[in-house]
């Protein structure tokens, strides 16, 4: 299974496992829309995209000749973008209260996760990286076409020391519901080098595409705070060495304080998640190492839930410090990828992040790039996904608002009129797809 699959064009596929979905066999021509390719090129108006066998066979100015065998879809007045990549979601988590979820039967939790998968695709996210919670069973059901959902890369569980961000055990020894019910490793508490190695190998055996470590504490864990230390640099390095011999699977680090970002980058992670506190010299380190930052601004800037946590002064101080760090990272040229931490942020509103990225200093075109090709590159899927070019899979999104002029409108799933995966319509609000 480690042999890199090859596509019919003979180009070697990327190192990462390509999450499959059913593809359309019908030949299609999408004509008349403005195409934004995800690769920072100027938009093309009155464009044409031809799809054959689930892949893009042509993209460019609209051609006047007819292709007898192709169905034509008229997209005048619309915009076509690559399917988005959300590099940080938790699809089994719901912003709903724990008390309500406590009353659920296990089937209700599965049904809720299926709803989250569909909402994510319908928001325009055709590929998602679940950074703990979702099991490979969901990925297999999507590949088989039994369930509609994004192509999935999975961390399965995250690693932290005892009492750290990944440790759900309460002081009295009890567990939250999700941890009691986990059939695959739902959490991985590691304190020694041997435990780290064992946990990583079990996750790879279970089907992980990425290893998630917590080099700092966080806000939702029972015992620690964002200022606390987590997995040390030595253990991150150990994991990086182990993964070098396993298709070079990437490491993603939950890192909220400055020291934890440094430990992650120096240890060899591919991405820093959150990065809410970074000195200028730490930002320089990200630039030097080419580490991607996934700032999850949707969660940082989320409004407080009614009856939920108080929007107190300490939260405002944290938000201001985080925005400053992320703006300085953007100015310094750190590569950014879109991630929402949906699960804490509501599912199905993933493109809220685009407007936040613009407010952090990206241009709208750069925000689209962060949400498409940059995310695909982080997942090592950019050979096939993340941009509109010949040979790429036809994962596409059709919107009815100009993303470069009205980017905040993309947050509303009603703006996303159609979504294609492998040339197949998985959302079609206007009934434009072939019958
Ligand atoms: Zn997260």
Image: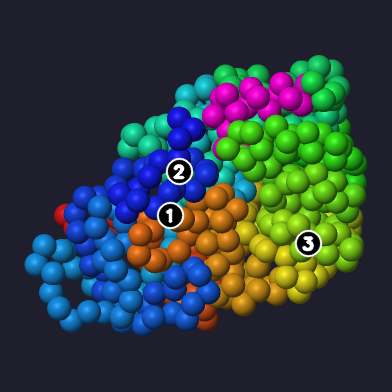
Q: Quickly name the residue at label 1.
A: 384
Q: Residue 132 carries which label?
A: none
Which secondary structure lies at badge 2? loop
Per the model, the C-alpha gap separating discs 3 and 2 is 28 Å
Q: Report the magenta residues as a range.
A: 195-210
**Label 1 vs 3, first from the N-terminus:** 3
- Residue drawn at (56%, 56%), measured in percent from left and top? 377
Does residue 409 sit above or below 167 in this rendering? Answer: below
Q: Which mark is residue 18?
A: 2
Quadrant housing residue 237: top right
Per the model, the C-alpha gap separating discs 1 and 2 is 8 Å
Mark nearest the camera among 1 and 3 is 3
**Label 1 vs 2, first from the N-terminus:** 2
Residue placed furthest toward the top: 173
- Residue drawn at (52%, 47%), measured in percent from left and top? 128
Residue 53 relative to residue 388: left or right: left
Give yes or no for residue 206 being in the magenta stretch.
Answer: yes
Which secondary structure lies at badge 1? loop
Which secondary structure lies at badge 3? helix
User: Could you say where residue 113 lies in the image, as x and y percent from the top left?
Assistant: 50, 36
Residue 7 relative to residue 68: left or right: right
């Amino acid at each position: 299974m480690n042999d890199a699959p090859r596509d019919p064009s003979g180009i070697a596929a990327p190192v990462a496992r390509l999450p499959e979905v059913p593809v359309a066999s019908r030949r299609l021509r999408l004509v008349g829309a403005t195409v934004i390719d995800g690769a920072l090129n100027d938009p093309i108006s009155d464009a044409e995209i031809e799809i054959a066998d689930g892949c893009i066979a042509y993209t460019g100015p609209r051609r006047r000749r007819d292709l007898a065998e192709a169905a034509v879809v008229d997209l005048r007045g619309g915009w076509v973008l690559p399917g988005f990549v959300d590099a940080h979601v938790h699809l089994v988590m719901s912003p709903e209260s724990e008390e309500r979820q406590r009353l659920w039967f296990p089937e209700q939790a599965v049904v809720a996760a299926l709803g989250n998968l569909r909402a994510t695709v319908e928001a325009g996210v055709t590929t998602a990286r679940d950074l703990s919670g979702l099991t490979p069973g969901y990925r297999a059901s999507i590949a088989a076409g039994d369930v509609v959902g994004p192509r999935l890369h999975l961390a399965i569980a995250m690693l932290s020391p005892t009492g750290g961000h990944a440790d759900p055990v309460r002081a009295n020894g009890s567990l939250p519901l999700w941890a009691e019910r986990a059939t695959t490793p739902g959490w991985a508490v590691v304190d020694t080098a041997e435990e780290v190695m064992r946990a990583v190998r079990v996750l790879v055996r279970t089907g992980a595409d990425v290893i998630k470590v917590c080099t700092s504490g966080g806000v939702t864990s029972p015992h620690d705070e964002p200022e606390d230390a987590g997995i040390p640099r030595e253990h991150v390095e150990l994991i990086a060495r182990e993964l070098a011999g396993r298709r070079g699977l990437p490491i993603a680090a939950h890192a909220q304080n400055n020291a934890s970002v440094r430990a992650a980058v120096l240890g060899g992670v591919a991405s820093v998640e959150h990065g809410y506190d970074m000195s200028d010299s730490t930002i320089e380190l990200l630039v030097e190492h080419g580490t991607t930052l996934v700032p999850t601004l949707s969660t940082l800037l989320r409004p407080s839930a009614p009856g939920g946590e108080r929007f107190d002064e300490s939260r405002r101080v944290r938000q201001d410090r985080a925005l400053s760090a992320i703006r300085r990272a953007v100015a310094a040229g750190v590569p950014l990828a879109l991630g929402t931490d949906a699960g804490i942020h509501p599912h199905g509103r993933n493109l809220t992040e685009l407007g936040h990225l613009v407010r952090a200093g990206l241009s709208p075109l750069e925000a689209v790039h962060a949400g498409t090709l940059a995310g695909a590159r982080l997942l090592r899927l950019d050979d096939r996904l993340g941009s509109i070019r010949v040979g790429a899979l036809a994962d596409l999104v059709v919107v009815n608002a100009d993303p470069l002029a009205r980017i905040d409108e993309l947050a509303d799933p009603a703006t996303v009129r159609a979504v294609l995966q492998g040339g197949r319509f998985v959302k079609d609000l206007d009934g434009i797809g072939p019958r």
